[in-house]
Image: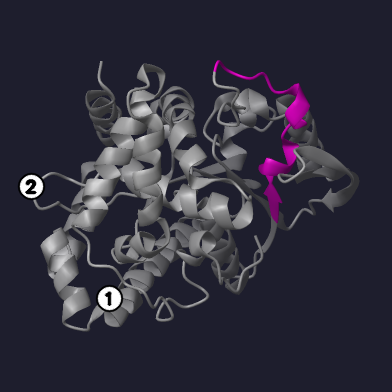
Amino acid sequence: MSVKNSDAKFEQAEQRNIPKMVIQNVLDWNVAHGVDTIAGLNNRVREGTFPALVQEGDKEYVRNVTRAADEIIKHRDAVRIVVIAGPSSSGKTTTTIKLNERLQTAGLNIIPINLDNYFFDLEMHPKDEFGDYDFEVPEALDLDLINAHLADLIKGKTVHVPRYNFKTGKREKKSDPLKLERNQILLIDSLHGLYEKMTRSVPREMKFRLYIETLSQLKDNEDNWVRWTDIRLLRRMVRDSWHRSYDPVRTIGHWHYVRKSEMRYIVPFITTVDFVLNGALPFELPIHKKYMFPYFEKAIEEFKGNVRREDAYIRAKRVQKLLNEIEIVEDDSCVPGTSLLREFIGGSVYAY
């Protein structure tokens, strides 16, 4: 199966598990704001209304986060843990922070826990035939330790959360004590939060599960839908380069791990969630082009003719073609520090 057809089948499988009304609402919003096509998006850039689009898009995202928070508030007597799950670079971390802000205004005391700190040391990860490490499988995390800590937390015990350093690939010697009081809710931001073994020690009625995905409803100049995975790839590339000192071309080459893990550990469990949230922003592609477009020519040259890297080559060609159609926005100062996009391009007021 070609990567093109594989990606299409993956996205179709994901869409089948997401309520149609959620996707329809995204499309309706885009149509109403003239950004359901790349031509329309480019018009917003050319006519000088792009900053207004940024404000409109951020406002819609926050509105949906507020709706999710209100659902949690309805079940505040039973819920002890809120799980925010979704594929790589869908916006889980910022959503966790903003959800926290909203719930606190309702008098709830929220305690976040970042499961990325539970990665095993890099030296414990096996390498594939390309010499790459696979961070995308749940087993890259210490699931036994996570569940032991979750069980202790809901019992009111103190646990010691490890610190993981992505630049060194190791847990640091220091850890952070954490205790969950009876009037507090634990907030989990995890790529694999829906994977049952991730939170098996917590009864279902004590968990509220939120799924976030870049549910973009945008057509290119050939009337094809822009793939959700390509938006997330661009986000991951710029985030990796800024925050993890990782070559964006290597991110493209690593993306086959991401897709394989999503289909195995995320997509099958979408139907178990309590809320689906759109993490796509209608204004992000012109800004991603500013940061990432030059890397695709390099990636195409590096992966061309290598049958073992055909997936990376096809994706690089596809995203390069997409960005070719997009009007670039060089000045991203119109994107506020509170925006979800700042999680990836830098300049956020939030600490990640």
120 part of magenta stretch:
yes
Q: Residue 73 versus residue 252: which sits nearer the camera?
A: 252
In the image, residue 294 lies at what x, y percent?
38, 54
Q: Measuring from the top left, give residue 13's x and y in whole percent.
A: 28, 28
Height in image: 211 above or below 102? above
Instruction: Provide residue 127's location: percent of width, then percent of height.
Output: 63, 20
Q: Does the magenta stretch include residue 280?
A: no
Picture mark count? 2
Q: Position of residue 195 (x, y in %)?
A: 54, 28
Circle 1 sits on which residue?
A: 53
**Residue nearest the viewer, comparing 38 with 54:** 38
Name the image colouring: one colour
- Residue 222 numbered mark, or none: 2
At horizontal 55% and vertical 66% (from top left) the residue drawn is: 346
Secondary structure type for disc 2? loop
Answer few, some or many: residues within 10 Å of disc 1's Cα (few below 14, many 20 plus, some between 14 and 19): many
User: Answer yes or no: do the residues labelled 2 and 1 have beta carbons within 8 Å?
Assistant: no
Residue depicted at x 67% and y 42% = 116
Q: Report the span colored magenta.
A: 112-129
Q: Quadrant of residue 308?
A: top left
Q: Which amino acid does label 2 sit on?
A: Glu
Residue 218 lies left or right of residue 284; in this view the side is left
Q: In which quarter of the image is residue 103?
A: bottom right
Sequence-wise, the earlier of marks 2 and 1 is 1
**Which sits in the foreground, 55 or 276?**
55
Q: Which residue is drawn at 62% across and 27% down?
A: 133
